[in-house]
Image (spheres, rainbow, N blue to C red):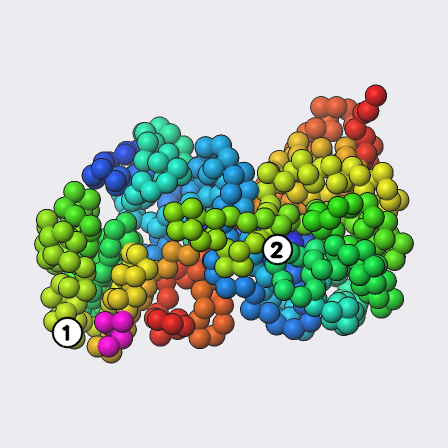
Amino acid sequence: MKKRVELFTVTRNRRINNEYIVLYAKPDGKLPDIAPGEFVEIKVENGPNTFLRRPISIHEVNKDTNEMLLLIQEVGEGTRLLVDLQPGDKLDLIYPLGNSFTVPKHGKMLLVGGGVGVAPLLILGRRLREEGADVNFLLGARNREILMDLTDYKQYGSIGVTTEDGSAGVKGYVTDHPLLKERLKDMDRVFTCGPDAMMRAVASAAKGAGIACEVSLENMMACGFGACLCCVVETKSGNKNTCTEGPIFNIEDLKGW
Amino acid sequence: MTASGTFGFGEEYEDFIDISALGGIVVKGTTLHHREGNPYPRMAETASGMLNAVGLQNKGVDHFVNHIYPRIKHYDTGIFVNVSGSTIEEYVQTAEKLNDLEKIPGIELNISCPNVKEGGMSFGVHCPSAIAVTSAVRDVYKGHLMVKLSPNVTDVTEMARGVEGAGADSISLINTLLGMAINAEKRRPLLSTITGGLSGPCIKPVALRMVWQVYNAVKIPIIGMGGIMNATDAIEFMLAGSTAIQVGTANFIDPTISVKIIEGIKEYMQRHRITDVNSLIGGMLVD
């Protein structure tokens, strides 16, 4: 899909909890096809400290309303401005960027997300379900207060939840959940997005069980389209750009995973 | 023109702009042999700019000649190759391999990369070395020889005069300023190499000053760069003495900025009733 720079208009700012919001935004023209795992680079206008664009993965697209949904976690100055955007505000995006998750037509799929990493798993879950695969989400959060709203995810598959303090679902990390501890061998493919340590733990479990695993990397980048060479990841065939040859990688291709 | 290391080989920008609309492009730094570059992390955002420590990741000059050049030679624009090396011999051999490429009118000799352990900037901060590498490449290279200077020197005019005397056809400046960034919470550097090259609008006043100084020191054309984000910035560089300008970091934030700058320069000329863009070169009015 051809990459473009486009001005979107915010149509809705849906507050999920104290840290997360979902931004709904639409372009003037028709949204192109978006594949699960692709991301956008958002320009944040705020003086000297938010100089570069912010890479944000695409949470979902709604073809009927022509809206793109972005899950934003308030973590720094740039994202603080984004969570304050209101309907009518403009959003300058470069998109669609990156490669995408594999979407098999059948089999049992385990989608493991932690923190804001749950974002691309919604569009992925929908696409897998549309193709006919069996979708199982495993979503982790620090506690109940910042757990993602599960309503949308429930349309597409079963849901397992972990929280570090046990305030919702199974207490502990995603790797403590029976889906990963006991039922992993029933799965045909694992997809994961979230903090590096979590993805490495999930990847290690999948590898141990001999199950294919795709991870969505979040390496820092300056451009998002293959020009700066800042976001490289070491693979078995040399350095690759996370932005153009990723962000989705099969763990078999990565060095040290 | 677009600056080396910020524009890939042009192909990365084909979705966004017509590459042939540009005056020229300087493609990614090329060395004699394949280089993997520095470990991640290679980038840190700073106030009004960024640090990078890519370390000249490239597949070597043969790969460029055999695989990339055939893909990009149809661009109707001046394609310059940025050439770097660890030894004078490497610079010379790399330049020789680019001699016969019909659509490459010149090279930009990179004696100012701050992100490699050997060579690179060490040639550009020591005047006798800068002269030696420039004249060695001049002896073998037939096309236009642009030499890219480092700002990490006490007197940039000394370097400029040196490379002019050694046969440079033009001078581009500035490369990045050596800088660093620390995460105070973790007490760790933000770059794997600890130090890296600072670019973006934060370096523009330094770059303008150096262009002005070099303009008053040499006769060959200057290609000015350093934090150019829009047409006004570009015109300021011309008024300080640049014959042409390069746009670097701004491409990351707006991949269409290079063509917008060209349009902006035209608009400025119309507004000021200027018919010859060359009249802007060094045109700063001083009482």
Residue B214 percent coordinates (x, y): 81, 42
Q: Amino acid at mark 1?
A: Asp
> Relative to B182, does residue A13 appear above or below in the rendering?
above
Q: Residue B138: within the magenta?
A: no
Residue B48 percent coordinates (x, y): 54, 38
The residue at the point 27 percent across, 61 percent down is A198
Q: Which mark is residue B5?
A: 2
User: In terms of secondary structure, where does tag 1 sit?
Assistant: helix
Q: Which residues are magenta?
A: A204-208
User: In terms of secondary structure, where does tag 2 sit?
Assistant: loop
Q: Chain of mark 1?
A: A
Q: Is residue B46 left or right of residue B90?
A: left
Q: Amino acid at mark 2?
A: Gly
Q: Is residue B182 left or right of residue B258?
A: left
The residue at the point 42 percent across, 42 percent down is A42
Residue on which disc 1 sits: A186
Quarter occupied by residue B109: bottom right
Quarter of the image where the C terminus of chain A is located: bottom left
Q: Are marks 1 and 2 on the same chain?
A: no
Q: Residue A206: within the magenta?
A: yes
